[in-house]
Image (cartoon, rainbow, N blue to C red):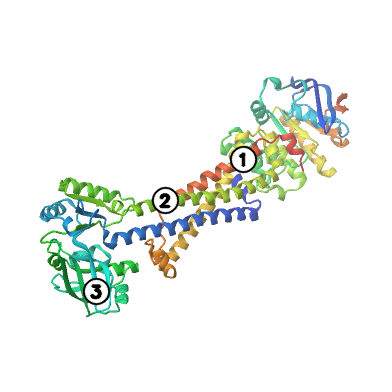
Amino acid sequence: MAIVETKNIKKTYKQGKVIVEALCGVDLIVDKAEFVALAGPSGSGKTTMLNIIGGLDVPDSGSVIVDNNKFADMNQAGLASLRLHKIGFVFQAFNLIPVLSAIENVEYVMLLQGVPKIERYDRAKEILDDVGLKGKYDRRPAELSGGQQQRVAVARAIVSGPAIVLADEPTANLDSKTGEDLVLMMKKMNTEKKVTFIFSTHDNMVMDYATRLVTIKDGLIVNDEIKA
Amino acid sequence: MVIILAWRNIWRNPRRTIVILLAVIIGVWSMIFLGALMRGMETQMVKNAISTLTGSIQIHHKDYRNDPVVENSMNNIDKLDKALSTTLDPGIFWTKRVRVNAIASNARHATGVTLVGIEPEKEAKISFIGKAMISGRFLLPEDKNKIIVGKAFIEKFNTKIGNKLILMSQNTQKEIASKAFRIVGIFSAESEAVEKQFVFVPISQALKILKMGDSISEISIMLPRLDITGKNETRAAEKLKAAINDDTFVIETWQQLLPMMKAYLKISGFFLYIWYFVVFVAMGFGIVNTSLMAIFERMREFGLMKALGMRPFQIIKGVVTESFFLLVLGILAGNILGFLSVAVIAKNGIDLSALAAGTQMWGIPRILYPEIWVQDVIVAGLVVLFLGILVSLYPAFKAARVTPTTAMTKN
């Protein structure tokens, strides 16, 4: 069952007087519970693709459907609501709100969703335990390592049971051991909780864990490989 | 959590928060302190004016105020006495007076004065004279040829207690009447002009010299508490008018008797609010500037929040909540500082004696005691809070308009 479906996505940017073609007609279908890596060199269009799937950016042409929601039919408020309820994000850096503790960062999305306080706290605690941060609930981001911060970000992304989690180079700022631990943890969530992950990377170790590897080059998918 | 987030956000940069807090505190303090000084001055000016023989309400013959001569005196006093006794509430005092222009002279000096015939016991409860004696004694009802004069008068006439003073005026028969009085007491007043202008004798003596029979110039009524808005006085005057029901008499409140004072009070209140606005404008720039700095520093964070699904109005709510905390803290601290500084100064007042020559002309007291009016404190707080939140909407809208992808790629 397709959870993400893009058809002929095109996107250009203007850099000064130069027009850059970021995506030149991308078709991508991602099924539920897939663990997809978008690979490719810098500037290939990976982040643009994730932003468009996440409703953070609007394509010049083409259509995007996420969990049966057609973006073309939605306004900004609708897209914000979709992001809040259906999409989890993990960014490369600056993932967390620095003045909130780990548990409060995880609770924050549920607060926006209107989840009652007690339920919010219990669910946030449970998910932090799942990502290996038991006992570190009250630590502020500055008191956590880079890997722990990304774990909190993953916990926040999956806590409300989104249709997909989009992760933009989640291991880029981590050392290889920490990065591998993070990917293993994401993989565990994917296997146990059937969370669909789409992440961009150019880290070979991360690609090795993906069940599907989509390679983008110059704004086009040049390879789409299902792995065992 | 919105509240927790806002509270923690304002303390992310404590130095900046303290700077903006200081701006709000000083602004609010200056509003309260200056307001207290102005209100204190207003109240004392009115009190001085009222106690300097005006009273809360006065009753005159209808022509007396235009032409204050003995012919325009009030007769039929029994009717007035009865109306006053039955109409006025307990605790309200009144007294009768004779007031005419006269010439006071001794061997070396002569000057124009206002001769005031008073009922000593009643007058002492109503006007300043009861507490103004600095030397000698106050008048007694049975005094035959005794007079009290002001300190400045004594200095001007180079005289002293025990010396004689001749008073000369025109009586009801348009004849010159004169009588020698012996000075038995000296009074002091807020203004030298009052000390030089008024001389006091028992009313029986004034009536006798001026051959006024049972007529009097005025009745002065003093309500127990000063109402600077004049509402209580107006209410009491209306009751009296209905009870007396005689066009021969005119009943006026201090606001009608002192129109300049009424106009001053009105302008003064207006200027106070203009001052509030000026202070706020200066403070407002600080609030906007600091809020903008804080917002620009956190643009990536706002981008993240929007990426997570936060709506623009929720971002506005967050930023405005931060401003609300800053403003409330500043207002509270400014109020505490304002009340404390007023309390310290109210103990001994501010001595304006050095400026006495200039201030007396306007009836400004020699010692100024600040006075806090609750309505001024509320208005100052509301002005700062309401306008502060209004100006913080600008940075809030800037934060709400951020595009996640643009904001999050900024360093």
Residue picked out by circle 1: B394
Q: Chain of mark 3?
A: B
Q: Position of residue B263 (x, y in %)?
A: 37, 51
Q: On the rendered structure, is B200 left or right of B309?
A: left
Q: Disc 3 to disc 2, how far (Cα)?
A: 41 Å
Q: Nearer the viewer, mark 3 or mark 1?
A: 3
Q: Position of residue B20 (x, y in %)?
A: 60, 53
Label 2 neighbour load within 10 Å: few <14, some 14-19, many 20+:
few
Q: Which of the 4 image quadrants contains residue B301?
A: top right
Check chain identity for marks 3 and 1: say if they share one.
Answer: yes
Label 3 neighbour load within 10 Å: few <14, some 14-19, many 20+:
some
Q: On the rendered structure, is A70 left or right of A43?
A: left
Q: Disc 2 to disc 1, how far (Cα)?
A: 34 Å
Check chain identity for marks 2 and 1: say if they share one.
Answer: yes
As helix, strand or loop, the secondary structure at mark 1 comes to: helix
Vertical order, B403 against B107 (above or below) = above
Could you tell me if residue B351 is visible in this image?
Answer: no
Residue picked out by circle 3: B105
What residue lies at 70% left-to-right and 47% top-to-bottom? A141
Q: Position of residue A161 (x, y in %)?
A: 67, 30
Q: Nearer the viewer, mark 2 or mark 1?
A: 2
Whether the residues at callouts 3 and 1 have beta carbons within 8 Å, the answer is no
Residue type beneath disc 1: Tyr
Residue picked out by circle 2: B267
Residue type beneath disc 2: Ile
Q: Disc 3 to disc 1, how far (Cα)?
A: 74 Å
Query: Looking at the figure, which quarter contains the C terminus of chain B?
Result: top right
